[in-house]
Amino acid sequence: MQLDDVIETFEFLDSWEDRYRLIIDLGRELPEFPEEAKTEDNRVEGCVSKVWLLHDIEQTTPQRLTFRADSDAFIVRGLIALILMAYSGRTPEEIRQTDIEGLFQRLGLEQQLSPNRRNGFFSMVERIKHLADQAQAA
């Protein structure tokens, strides 16, 4: 599923229970994350749930970053799926210019997630932006 499909489906669904189910289903579709990569070095700080993030830099022109991530919480896995749809396969410049806050608001997540989940979501975003900045500088 693409990000535009998620937005369209969210607009179609009437209840937050159905929207949460969709988010959880998105998390179930994440590619398998290697157990050996679930280390403190790959852990995203600022998340209440455990979240691990890996990245690769594709040596294309321009270079692109791809991300893989996992969590020990179902809803967080779904939020990870949304973040990866928005950022994975993008250039560092595209990552910096992505309006993730606009997406967050458009989906209505700012009203539905606890402050801790919201902080964790944006901690993942900040980590991705930091990795994009590092890739750009290298």
Image (cartoon, rainbow, N blue to C red):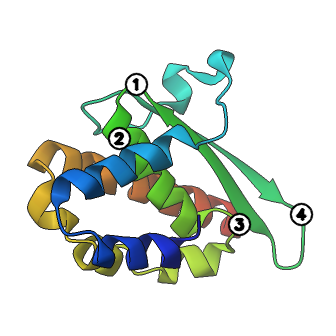
Which amino acid, by three-letter code, is at mark 2?
Answer: Val
How far is mark 4 from mark 2, CA to CA? 30 Å
Q: Earlier in the sequence, mark 4 or mark 1?
A: 4
- Which residue corresponds to mark 4? 59
Q: Earlier in the sequence, mark 4 or mark 3?
A: 4
Q: Earlier in the sequence, mark 2 or mark 3?
A: 2
Residue 17: x, y in percent?
19, 51
Rate crowding at label 2 as few (under 14), some (14 to 19) or many (20 or more) other CA atoms within 10 Å: many
Residues 85 and 58: in front is: 85
How far is mark 2 from mark 3, CA to CA? 21 Å
Q: Secondary structure at mark 3?
A: loop
Which amino acid, by three-letter code, is at mark 1?
Answer: Asp
Label annotation for residue 89: 3
Res 65 quadrant in image: bottom right
Contact, mark 2 vs mark 1 (Cβ under 8 Å): yes
Q: Earlier in the sequence, mark 1 or mark 3?
A: 1
- Which residue corresponds to mark 1? 72
| Residue at position x 63%, y 17% in the image | 35
How far is mark 4 from mark 3, CA to CA? 12 Å
| Residue at position x 58%, y 70% in the image | 2
Residue 18: x, y in percent?
26, 55
Q: Secondary structure at mark 2?
A: helix
In the image, farthest residue toward the right: 60
Res 134 quadrant in image: bottom right
Tell me how many marks there are. 4
The image shows residue 34, relative to residue 102, as above or below, that is: above
Which amino acid, by three-letter code, is at mark 3?
Answer: Gly
Q: Secondary structure at mark 4?
A: loop
- Which residue corresponds to mark 2? 76
